[in-house]
Image (cartoon, rainbow, N blue to C red):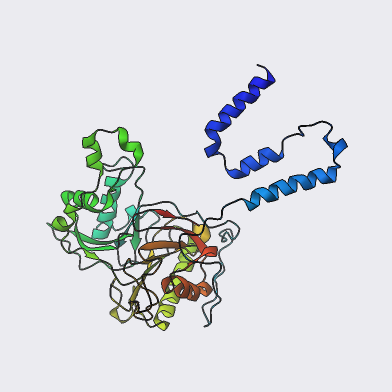
Amino acid sequence: MSPRSNLLNTLRYASHECAAIPPACFSTLHSSKPPLHPNRHHLWPHRDSRNSRNSRHSSSSSRRITIPPPFPVTPSCPEPICPCAPTPVMPEGLEIDHERDLNGTMAPYSQQVLILTGQHDWRSRIEEDGVEKGWGMLGRGLKGLIGRGGKYADPYNNIMITNSSFPPHHTTMTPTTTTASAILFPSFRYIPTIPLDEPSLDAFVRAFLLPTTLHPAHDVLPASQKAHMRRVPTLQSSFFPDMTQIQHSPTVLICGHGHRDQRCGIMGPLLQTEFRRVLRAKGLKVSGGEENGDGGFADALGRANVGLISHIGGHKYAGNVIVYLPPSLSSPGIPSMGGSEEGGAMSLAGKGIWYGRVEPRHVEGIVEETVLGGRVISEHFRGGVGADGEILRL
């Protein structure tokens, strides 16, 4: 094949694949081309040639469009005003990764099922825990239905199942009835009583966890099969009449899964204590701890929830924190979190924001900037999820 044919084929291939090549690749390929004119350096000195290339790159850079972030951003976490707990030293070989850019390190998911266990740590594989308890049965039952090979498995509908330290709501365990409790984010639903018989678990998945709209990859499937894969909202009230919508209280979740990795096991409880302290100092009553009998999850004006959760990925970025802010949350609204005449809907209302490399000294800034102010701290941002399960990036 002639050199000209090779060039034409290369151009044809590039025209089809250009969307898959990042801009950096185009820049590298462009700058590595040999001079088109052999006698070019007789006309311009080498220094001018280099300056010419630099001017072209500068011109190209000036034409780039800067896309604004989808929410208000604070570049770095403000320094704390009040004294806070010192940052613990991690065990040798389990250091925190301070080099990688955190943006985009969150694994995509459409919903998080937060199972209420009343425990503060769990076995490395949570499905092996709570063998004779309702919360353990719920976790195993859901994984059997939506996990790999399950009846409702869908690779385009990633559901994250995690245990939490919040205690379950008066669950029952009798020879005929066993129940558990769960919270769903970012749909902000609290289901205090979930029967664990097979029909009820099936209804729970169909009512809350299946997608409302299928991925285009499923377009080739028969209509009956697609209907089987879509959510059926009418099952929510018929099977789970005590379900409530979370409207007022922000929720802070901290990975404290020590049996999975010591880094989160060390950092998690420290951060939980610090978040409780700072939120109380801001005038909020905090649920999620055992002290004063105030351990249960709550939703009310002037309240916040802080709890430990099981593995969510990225132990090397410990401490890992998720902040969920209800859709109706207003700003500024301090301390009631109910808003004011001047304040409108908070920009992060209805969203979940993931932070990594959080230390006790960052807690005050996260509470001030994100929980109360509705701003994302970009240096700690791992990713986020919107009200409809859309992934948030910077």
For the residue pair 166 and 62, the one nearer the viewer reads as 62
Image quadrant in which you'd find residue 291: bottom left
> Which residue occupies the extreme top position in the image?
1
Q: Position of residue 241 (x, y in %)?
A: 15, 61
Q: Position of residue 269 (x, y in %)?
A: 44, 70
- The residue located at (31%, 69%) in the rendering is 328
Q: Is residue 56 left or right of residue 305?
A: right
- The residue located at (32%, 45%) in the rendering is 147
Q: Position of residue 273 (x, y in %)?
A: 43, 75
Indicate whether 362 appears above or below 8. below
The quarter of the image holding the N terminus is: top right
Q: Position of residue 7 (x, y in %)?
A: 65, 25
Indicate whether 10 appears above or below 285. above
Residue 257 visible to the viewer: no
> Which residue occupies the extreme front position in the image?
43
Q: Is residue 137 left or right of residue 362?
A: left
- The residue located at (25%, 33%) in the rendering is 222
Indicate whether 292 appears above or below 251. below
Q: Is residue 43 left or right of residue 31?
A: right
- The residue located at (43%, 70%) in the rendering is 374
Number of marks = 0
For the residue pair 234 and 35, the one nearer the viewer reads as 35
For the residue pair 214 and 48, the one nearer the viewer reads as 48
Residue 308 visible to the viewer: yes
